Every structure is written in structure tokens, then in C-alpha cells.
Image: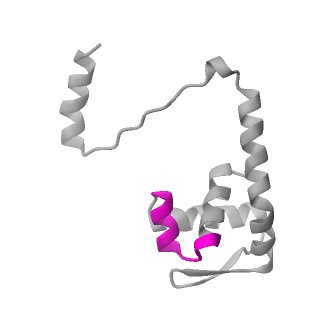
């Protein structure tokens, strides 16, 4: 099970709305929908009933929502304990239009 998909599920379940959840998660609505479909396939159970952009949790979805915060926290703690403190690296991701990044990245290369 993917930790990110579980976090997506929790956000979606708490908002009850695909549009609001995707906005909060900074991903597209189709990407969120796909991630939730994959999560249902992994768990081999239906987690919600979709009514437009609104979602209603099934009994399995409610059970997962109750257990997910502790599960997410345990996985994060496990990941932190497995990585030595000196090896942690911050990742910087920059999103831009192609024409801007072409010239901007050339400028960054000159700074080395």
C-alpha cells in the first residue's frame, strides 16, 4: 500500500468532495480519482460511493478512515528511523513552463 494514496484517501474522506480534496492536495481531480481507484484495487474493497464530485464512504471506507491516521504516523516514524540523520536530503522541485525552464536552467548551470 502506498503511503501517499492513504494520505490522499484521508483528505478525500475528510472533505467529502473530489474537487476540494484535489485542490488541498495540489493534484488534479483525475489524478486523485485514479489514485483512489488503485487504492480500492489494492485493498480489494469498495471504499466509497461516488455522487458527482461528492463521495460517501462505505463501511469499509469508514473503518479505513478510523485506522489511517495511526497507520500513516507509524509508517512515517518507521521511514524516519530507517534513514540515518546525516543522509536526509531536502529535495527542491521547481515547476515551470518549458520555454522559461530552458533559459532558467541554463542560468543555474552557469552559477556552479
Residue 57, image x, y percentages: 70, 79
Residue 17, image x, y percentages: 54, 76
**Dominant secondary structure of the residues highlighted in magenta in the image:** helix
Is residue 41 one of those drawn in magenta?
A: no
Q: Say which quarter of the image contains residue 110.
A: top left
- In the picture, the quarter occupied by the C terminus is top left
Tell me which residue sits at (20%, 39%) in the image: 100
Residue 58, image x, y percentages: 75, 80
Tell me which residue sits at (60%, 25%) in the image: 88
Q: Say which quarter of the image contains residue 66.
A: bottom right
Q: Look at the image and give the residue range highlighted in magenta.
A: 13-26
Tell me which residue sits at (74%, 57%) in the image: 69
| In front of the other: 105 or 74 | 74
Residue 74, image x, y percentages: 79, 45
Tell me which residue sits at (75%, 44%) in the image: 75
Direction from residue 83 to residue 36 in the image, left or right: left
Amino acid at each position: 500500500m502506498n503511503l501517499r494514496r492513504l494520505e490522499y484517501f484521508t483528505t478525500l474522506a475528510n472533505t467529502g468532495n473530489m474537487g476540494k480534496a484535489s485542490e488541498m492536495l495540489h493534484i488534479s481531480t483525475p489524478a486523485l480519482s485514479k489514485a483512489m481507484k488503485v487504492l480500492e484495487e489494492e485493498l480489494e474493497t469498495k471504499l466509497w460511493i461516488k455522487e458527482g464530485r461528492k463521495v460517501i464512504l462505505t463501511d469499509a471506507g469508514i473503518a479505513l478512515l478510523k485506522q489511517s491516521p495511526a497507520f500513516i504516523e507509524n509508517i512515517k516514524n518507521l521511514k524516519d528511523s530507517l534513514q540515518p540523520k546525516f543522509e536526509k536530503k531536502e529535495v527542491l522541485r521547481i515547476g515551470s513552463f518549458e520555454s522559461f525552464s530552458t533559459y532558467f536552467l541554463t542560468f543555474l548551470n552557469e552559477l556552479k
